[in-house]
Image: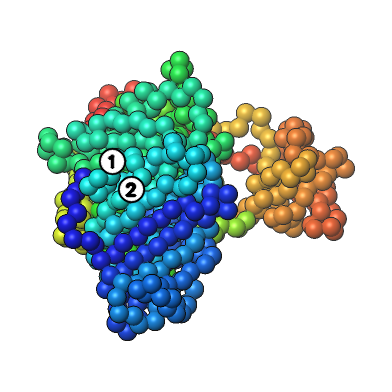
Amino acid sequence: MKATSALPAIRYAIVPKSPAAHLFEVTVTVSNPAPEGQRFTLPAWIPGSYMVREFARNIVTIGATCRGRKVALDKLDKHTWQAAPCKGTLIVTYEVYAWDLSVRAAHLDDTHGFFNGTSVFLRVEGQAQAPCEVDVLRPRGAAHKAWRVATALEPAQGTAVLDFGRYLAVDYDELIDSPVEMGTFVHGTFKACGVTHEVAITGPVPNLDLDRLLRDMKKICEAQIRLFEPGASSRSRVPMSRYVFLLMTVGDGYGGLEHRASTALLASRNDLPVQGQARMSDAYRGFLGLVSHEYFHTWNVKRIKPAVFAPYTLDQESYTRLLWLFEGFTSYYDDLMLVRSGVIDPAAYYELVAKTVASVLRGSGRLKQTVAESSFDAWTKYYRQDENAPNALVSYYTKGSLVALALDLTIRSRTRGQKSLDDIMRALWQGYGRDFYRGSPVGIDEDAVQPFFEEVSGLDLSEFFATAINGTRDLPLAALLERVGLTLAPVTPENGRPALGAKTAKRGDDLTLAQVLDGGAAQAAGLSAGDALVAIDGLRVTSGNIDKLLERYRPGDRVTVHAFRRDELREATLTLDTPEISQYRIAETRDRAAAQRREKWLSA
Ligand SMILES: [Zn+2]
């Protein structure tokens, strides 16, 4: 709670006006509009999701009044409006269409509402630094009597936590960095290092084991707080005074978006633990990985940031070559924190790393694009993947997490266990993150990263940066893992089934080629993504029988294939590829000195 003295100059109000039509009505009241005519802008993208989404296209109607009289509101470009000059308080009222059940935008129906400020709150140009307040209003009708509100925004005096009413933000940046959920969610809390963490779960989850969920989340959060602030003992080491997890559950879905004191998560209800079932399912492990990932961003990207994000430029793309650090390193620590916090055992952790290795090595795009380039082009490539993606690009998430693993093991090895990646993360935190929202909003320059890492580790990392960050050569993971007593080896498929050199997809009973791999059998035979494979050697192929049929052949066999491209039948001779390595295995060796190094790494 925080007392309000004078009225802030910027006031918003938002009400779910018509859940059936998926419309929020928003007003923004500006006490001191710009004399030459006040401009308003809606962001084109939301931080954390690096794609221009043009949120303003969901504004359906918009108008302005000044002292009770209508004033002209000119649209200047796709997301900017300018009101005619007016003396006195200016009010802009607009409707926002909200029918996007993701963590990135806004959603409203008669079961619940969710919004990110980037989708609903116009920025008052020239006054974005000003404190603002927002009235979150209950939708009309008896059906919404039981609705509550969950958000990291601070309730104003007179508004109870979880209630509709007035909320406060120190500036526009905080306002749009604090998503809001409203509805009849399940609500749980836990304390991590003395700070209250709330979890609001939307959507039906039969027999949810809430206690187990909260217990596991607490362990993960505390492990991360201790990583960044190992010395401190009070709640002051936690970067925020309160944290909120907003979890939307659906039948099938997965996603998360980080914010400074909250996160929005989307998950399948089947990922969540069931009462009376103690085992750790792969699905629940994956969910906890998501929790761990978004929470880690509290430090890495919400406070330790690239300089170009301090502040964000939300009208257009904002380019950085560093997403391998902000997303990749976060992806490394998300699973590592599961094992360090004791939520999973080392064997489960090895499985997760092996899966990441397999996914990176599968695509030849890794030999063409560096993680620095992948970061820079996130807007047009990673976020807009097409059928050629595995041939053309590398993920700064998965490859970035392996870069982090390789760097961590390299530093541990070359400093004989004196230093690790943890030291670098802590130094970044001290140098850039800790005071980011305390008057020192400075981000790290693109060129400062390597010297920073070298200074903290005391190592010359020029070779590492040249190959791992700015090069495409595969990382020497097997050799590095051996230093901590682990072997990394491909798993040869037992059935010996030859490969088509393509990723396939079901379309009804039909089998279509979703992605054709560079240099593979399908490409050599002239087949393309989108082709529907109908026969091999005159035998009908379906999505159900293709594996069994291929098991009858050996790599190098020449087969006649029939495929439809659109409505045109094609015939081709295809020479089957060697089986695809889609799995790797990581196992412990008997080296006792290496085992000690491994235990230090995994327990830290
Ligand atoms: Zn992330």
State which quadrant residue 510 falls in.
Answer: top right
In the rendered image, residue 295, in percent from the top left (x then y), is placed at 32, 42
For residue 165, which numbered disc appears in the image?
Answer: 2
Left or right, residue 345 beside residue 362:
left
Left or right, residue 109 beside residue 529:
left
From this viewpoint, is residue 297 visible?
Answer: no
Circle 1 sits on which residue?
Answer: 160
State which quadrant residue 384 falls in.
Answer: bottom right
Q: Secondary structure at mark 1?
A: loop
**Residue for point 51% across, 25% down:** 206
* Amino acid tagged 2: Gly
Q: Secondary structure at mark 2?
A: strand
For ligand 1, tell me if the residue under mark 2 lies within 8 Å.
Answer: no
Q: Is residue 381 above or below residue 301?
A: below
As drawn, which residue projects farthest toward the front? Answer: 68
Q: Quadrant of the N terminus?
A: top left
Q: Quadrant of the C terminus?
A: top left
Residues marked 1 and 2 touching at CB (< 8 Å): yes
